[in-house]
Amino acid sequence: MSKKLAAKASLIQMPPVAAEPSLGGAERVERGDRADLGDPRPKTAPGSMALFMASQSAAVKEAEELRERLKAFDGALPVRALDAQAVRPSRWANRHEHSFADEAFAELKADIAAAGTNVQPVAVRALPRVLNGSTPEGQPGYELVFGHRRHRACLELGLPLQAMVAEMSDQQLFEAMERENRARKNLSAWEQGAMYRRALDEGLYPSQRRLAEALGVDVSLVSKSLSLARLPDAVVAAFPSPLDIQFRWAQPLAEALQKDPEGVLGRAGRLKASGEVRSAAQVLAVLVGGADVTLLNRSTPTHRVIEGTAGRQALMTRDTRGRVVIKFAAGALGEAAEAELAAYLEKLLSRR
């Protein structure tokens, strides 16, 4: 056995040793110093493997750290700056034009103007005709999911629109829009109803109950909202703004229309034609039968306008708890009139 091993060992040939160039004294000293300090390069195969494993371990650790950091962005959508003109409102848009003319919108617009763009991004989806990031010239390439007020502000200011681009169906868009509105500036009762009506009329949901379940809202709220949205146009036009119509008015208006549709429509037409400025509560009182009528749901305050000379007025309001408040316009009473009013109220309250 030993002879065979010796014979095999004799067959092994070592590579020739390259002739080392002659070194000068300084180079020999430098080489000697480096040898004394120890060459960091491994001299054996196990050493080379250990060095390789160490470097690989560091790379694996770095990759794991990056994966952990990326988990925080799972599901996040990238935000990009779009031309506001390249984004169109959704066909499910639920904001009435009056929502873009109130004080809240003016404040939002001022904030966006100061920042140079909308800080809180809107959400959009690409329209089907968008190919390779381009659209036919002059046509919008994106449709709003939510953020119609921010989009309008950027559009009017000529500023870029910060937007998240997502892929979603009509139903997903509708639900995302509705939930985002509830989390921000709530829609008015009439706007809410108009949104629900459009979804049902276009077959997005088969019934009010299915719509309510999908949105996580009470079905009675959906029913009241739809009742307001389906009011005749003449009745809606009688109010100062559709945004003033309240949920609790759905029942009295519906009952008044059922009992006397011609009378309600006639009163609505006269209110609109008169051009007089009335509060929404005053309009409601007239529509359901007169300013002094007791409302059907007992929850709407009773208002009475007291007319004086020279156009002076006072508004007397009685709420559902029986409290009475009288308001005068600024400057309507002088000091003497205020003293006289106080004396009269004191005398009135002293009666038995």
Image (cartoon, rainbow, N blue to C red):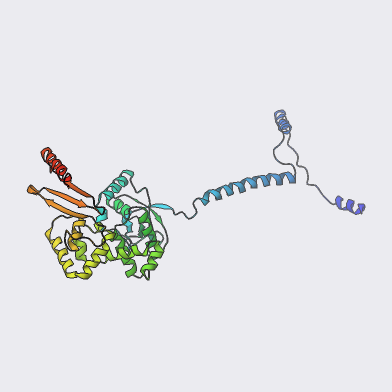
User: Is any part of residue 132 visible from this angle?
Assistant: yes
Where residue 22 appears, as percent x and y from the top left, is 74, 34
Residue 229: image quadrant is: bottom left
Q: Residue sitting at 28 percent across and 66 percent down?
A: 227
Q: In this image, 261 relative to 67: left or right?
A: left
Q: Where is residue 278 in the image (x, y as percent from the top left)?
A: 17, 55
| Observer-nearest of 172 and 268 | 268
Residue 214 found in image quarter: bottom left
Whether 275 is drawn above or below 343: the answer is: below
Q: How many labels does the image show?
A: 0
Is residue 169 visible in this depiction of the protein? no
Residue 283 rendering spot, x and y as whole percentages: 18, 59
Residue 124 x %, y %: 38, 58
Looking at the picture, tell me which residue is in the foreground, 30 or 214.
Answer: 214
Residue 26 as seen in the image, left or right of residue 350: right
Name the residue: 17% across, 70% down: 262
Quadrant in which the N terminus appears: bottom right
The extreme left residue here reads 310
Check the image and name the residue furthest to the front. Answer: 352
Q: Which is nearer the eye, 38 or 223? A: 223
Looking at the image, residue 37 lies above or below residue 243: above
Query: In the visual, does 295 lie left or right of 88?
Result: left
